[in-house]
Amino acid sequence: MTTLSQLSPNSRIWIYQSSKEFTADEIQKINALATEFVNTWSAHGAALKAAAEVLHKRFLLIGVDEQQAAASGCSIDKSVALVKKIEADFNTDLLDRMQVAYRSGNEIKTFKLPQASSLLEKAELTENTVIFNNLVTTKKDWDEKWEVTLKDSWILQTVN
């Protein structure tokens, strides 16, 4: 079984953020579903070198090393079908791109993007708050730019 850390730096990554924190039991079940999926994932008959896992009780990451075989539109559609199945089975939303996760001490909290200005005014968020940039698309960017300070993210540009 391939893990995310074993994928090459240029591998494609998709990050899906849950609207709720998953329980240990849910994580185990989701990881089993995701592992079963990536172990049989293919594009035009070619097996994909892929990995998937839940991180921080909130994020589903799916990665594919396209040096072996590239993910096609149909194979990407299959991964989205997996995400929708997880949403339905575990009563969560994984496709809401208006939701932002950030670190608050040892916790990961979320807010809706339109709330950013208000949270900044109340100092619940600062320029140094670490947020999760779920827009990264490669393993290299995931390794280097997934967790960034608010001041180094795209979010401040939307509220200023």
Image (cartoon, rainbow, N blue to C red):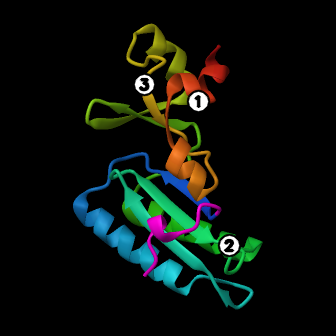
From the viewer's side, name the closer residue of 11 and 125: 11
* Residue 117 screen position, x and y as percent: 53, 15
- The residue identified by callout 2 is 66
Q: Is residue 7 magenta?
A: yes
Whole-angstrom CA distance, mark 1 to mark 3, is 10 Å
Name the N-terminal-most of marks 1 and 3: 3
Residue 129's disc is 3
Q: Secondary structure at mark 2?
A: loop
Q: Quadrant of the C terminus?
A: top right
Q: From the viewer's perspective, tell me whether residue 108 is left or right of residue 79.
A: left
The amino acid marked with disc number 1 is Ser
Q: Position of residue 147 (x, y in %)?
A: 47, 39
Q: Which residue: 58% across, 82% down?
A: 41
* Residue at (59% x, 61% y) in the render: 9
User: Which residue is depicted at the point 42% across and 24% down?
Assistant: 129
Label 3 crowd (10 A; few <14 / some 14-19 / many >=20): some
When the figure is inspected, residue 49 is found, relative to residue 160, above or below; the finding is below
Q: Amino acid at mark 3?
A: Thr
> x, y (%) of residue 12?
64, 62
Magenta-drawn segment: 1-10
Residue 109: name its quadrant: top left
Q: Secondary structure at mark 1?
A: loop
**Which SS class for mark 3?**
loop
Q: Are marks 1 and 3 in contact (CB under 8 Å)?
A: no
Q: Amino acid at mark 2?
A: Glu
